[in-house]
Amino acid sequence: MKEYLKFYINGEWVDPVTPRTLEVENPATEENFAVISLGSQADVDKAVAAAKAAFPAFSQTSVEYRADLLDKIAAGIQKRLPELAEAVSTEMGAPMWLANAAQVPSGMGHFATTAQILRNYEWEELKGSTLLRKEPIGVCGFITPWNWPINQIACKVAPAIAAGCTMVLKPSEIAPIDAMILTEIMHEAGVPKGVFNLVNGDGPGVGSSLSSHPDVDMVSFTGSTRAGVLVAQAAAPTVKRVAQELGGKSPNIVLPNADLKKAVAGGIIQMMTNSGQSCNAPSRMFVQKDQQDEAIAIAKATAESVKVMMPAEATPGAIGPISNGNQYQKVQDLIETGIKEGATLVAGGPGRPEGFNKGYFARPTVFANVTNDMTIAREEIFGPVLVMIPYEDVDDAVAMANDTVYGLAGYVQGPEEDARKVANRIRAGQIQINGARPDFTAPFGGYGQSGNGREWGEEGFEEFLEIKAVIGYKAG
């Protein structure tokens, strides 16, 4: 079993103040493969102190210096991509094809994209006699999830470095190994002492300490809405900035004049990718009621074509396990709830797929004849489960799409002009039209209980900046 027992504080690998360990499980085998240390308030205090001490000097470094640093980190990720992909696959179950094609490259992409944004960013603007100046916010605390681990770390760490901030990272204790490798990459890239610090741990031991710490100027959290509320409550007494990327129950509206086969099949495949463990997954598919029978047949055939395989053996398009036992049980419970509430089970269902008697593998599942008030249409399932909801007309589809506490993403399929009009009516932070590819320069974040603030692109970079107005900068 591999041991990762040290934390990275002030440019060095150090022992925790109080030894306490946790074994890391491989969700495909249900066997432990690594052990990490769990931190405490004392470890957070040390890491925050290092970040605070490093901030004055790092905040004054040049744009080119920080951009070069980001480029070096991106190059380091590229160099160690196979090792990082194996870590991600082993710790959270992503098939190796997905880890190599998307999980790790997305993290690398955020560092590279942020370097370009930084080099072209205007830091000062003169309005009359007043200078508006952007400055780094200070010490940042980062709490990241297990579903897209290095991606979520990168879209916080990269803009923070670009802005001139210093930081403390608490990666998910379920998927911590990729973060340890990334830390080695950052050390080798020459990130100055104290600028980046890593403390492993759980929410109560490290997450709450980081969120409430008086010397942390900003906390950025990605995870469930429930946990995001706790982070915001912990942060409130110190009035720090809180950025949250939380849950979603994203609608996918298939317009009546869309290519039905392409739209439905594409929506199913996109939902099942990463075993449905994406906060922006298109989990509610709206299809015009007269097209339901045909859409159900397409959905059934597509879902049944999705292979479930061991991560190391998975062919492109195949899915792996749910990332941990607790989440697997939640998915199973919600599938059972869908059946009890009267939804039509089109494909999949409870239990493991045929041929699996071990590991947190779930069956690619589709429900039809779902009403928007059913539990499976309201709650984020975070597994390979899609619900199909019939609508009367486009106004009805839009109304149901917006009838949710969430607002992270939305999807529209149909002729471009029609799709654009519907996209404008969906209350969500990012809308994808006709299966468009991700854009790392486009802001990502949500409305409602899907969070506050944005990640990715220039808007994500600006989350780490304060605005200073220097009045009388120029004589009137």
Image: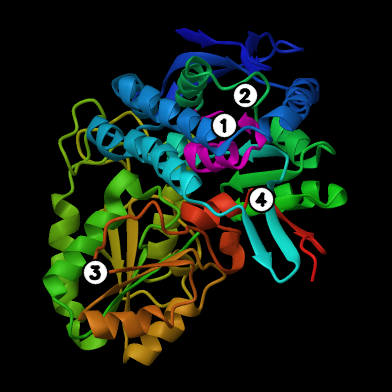
Q: What kind of residue is marked 4? A: Leu
Residue 173 in the magenta stretch? The answer is: yes
Instruction: Residue 379 in the image: state x and y as whole percent.
Output: 50, 62
**Marks 2 and 3: which is nearer the front?**
3
Mark 1, residue position = 171
Task: Give the distance between the C-alpha atoms of the residues marked 2 and 1, in whole angstroms.
Answer: 6 Å
Give the crowd class for mark 1: few <14, some 14-19, many >=20 residues within 10 Å. many
Mark 4, residue position = 465
**Residue for point 46% across, 36% down:** 149
Q: Are marks 4 and 2 in contact (CB under 8 Å)?
A: no
Q: What kind of residue is marked 3? A: Asn
Give the crowd class for mark 3: few <14, some 14-19, many >=20 residues within 10 Å. many
Instruction: Residue 66 in the image: state x and y as whole percent.
Output: 54, 33
Task: Give the distance between the C-alpha atoms of the residues marked 2 and 3, in whole angstroms.
Answer: 40 Å
Task: Give the distance between the C-alpha atoms of the residues marked 1 and 4, in whole angstroms.
Answer: 23 Å
Label at residue 200: 2
Instruction: Residue 467 in the image: state x and y as whole percent.
Output: 71, 57
Q: Are marks 1 and 3 in contact (CB under 8 Å)?
A: no
The span shown in magenta is: 153-175
Please report whichever mark, 2 or 1, sits nearer to the chain's N-terminal start.
1
Please report whichever mark, 1 or 3, sits nearer to the chain's N-terminal start.
1
Q: Are marks 4 and 3 in contact (CB under 8 Å)?
A: no
Please report whichever mark, 4 or 3, sits nearer to the chain's N-terminal start.
3
